[in-house]
Amino acid sequence: MKKALITLILLVGFLNLTAQNASVAWYNWSNPETFLLSPPPLITGWGVHSDSLSHTFNGKMFYEFNGEYYPISNWAEYYLWFVNKYWYNFTDPQLYEYYYLQNDDYEMARYIAGDNYQGYYYPSRINITFVGKDVDVNRLNANSKYIASNDKKVKKLEKQVTFSEEQYKKEHDIKKNEQIGNKNQAKLHKIETKNELNNKEYKHKTNNNSSTNGNSSGNTMKSEGIPSSNTQKKSSGSKTIK
């Protein structure tokens, strides 16, 4: 039994090394055996805990993205990881995950083979056949030019992935800095507006106090300069005693 297992592993390894690309029918998109007999993915995502998880789950592969580990046992799972990690290279990437959750092999395969992937070379060396189905676009047909079939193309694929990741990070950082700048400007504007309102309120109070003081002093001057009627009457009614 052990000898047969070793022979099978060596055979699979030989097939993976020698095969340039393999044909995968859409209905085998979630088939582990089809994945095992296909050339291995060109872009991988091993994480710190991949080995320990593989040991725990009977040799199953696990790729990491953003702290989460994705089991990789078929093309459906592999492309779920790839679409999630490089979502900025796809149109409506949430659609693939939706099809994955629905176990819809046809829609998953059609999404990957369609115009949704913005990269040039694909991270896998497989052709997709849509037996019994009509599709408008199949970039991964038998004559596909989007498969990295040699070392030179594989290097271009790796540069393509690295470049797109760096570009995304730069754009993300720029947008983040712009958002921080906008928030700081909004805070500054709020502070300036508050200070302006405080200054206006202070000036208004100062003017009111000045008006009140002016009226008080005017009334005092009038009372000092004009004798009262009682005083006038007393003066006119008094007689001089000789």
Image (tube, rainbow, N blue to C red):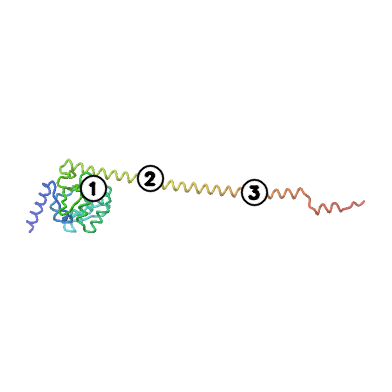
Q: Disc 3 residue type?
A: Ser
Instruction: Say which residue appears at 23% left-offset and 59% top-offset.
Output: 102
Q: For label 3, count other residues whose C-alpha is less than 10 Å away and answer few (under 14), some (14-19) or many (20+).
A: few
Q: CA distance from mark 1 to mark 2?
A: 32 Å
Q: Position of residue 171 (x, y in %)?
A: 32, 44
Q: Quadrant of residue 150?
A: top left
Say which of 160 and 110 sits in front: 110
Instruction: Say which residue appears at 70% left-offset and 48% top-offset.
Output: 218
**How many numbered marks are there?**
3
| 237 left or right, relative to 150 | right
Q: Which residue is mark 2?
A: 178
| Precedes in sequence: disc 1 or disc 2 | 1
Label 1 SS: loop
Q: Which residue is mark 3?
A: 211
Q: Position of residue 228 (x, y in %)?
A: 78, 52
| 223 left or right, relative to 198 | right
Say which of 200 and 117 sits in front: 117
| 130 left or right, relative to 68 | left
Q: Disc 1 residue type?
A: Asp
Q: CA distance from mark 1 to mark 3?
A: 77 Å
Instruction: Say which residue appears at 28% left-offset and 48% top-offset.
Output: 88
Which residue is at the far top? 152
Q: Which residue is mark 1?
A: 115
Q: Quadrant of residue 162?
A: top left
Label 2 SS: helix
| 1 or 2: mark nearer the eye | 1
| Precedes in sequence: disc 1 or disc 3 | 1
Q: Disc 2 residue type?
A: Glu
| Precedes in sequence: disc 3 or disc 2 | 2
Q: Position of residue 85 (x, y in %)?
A: 26, 50
Label 3 SS: helix
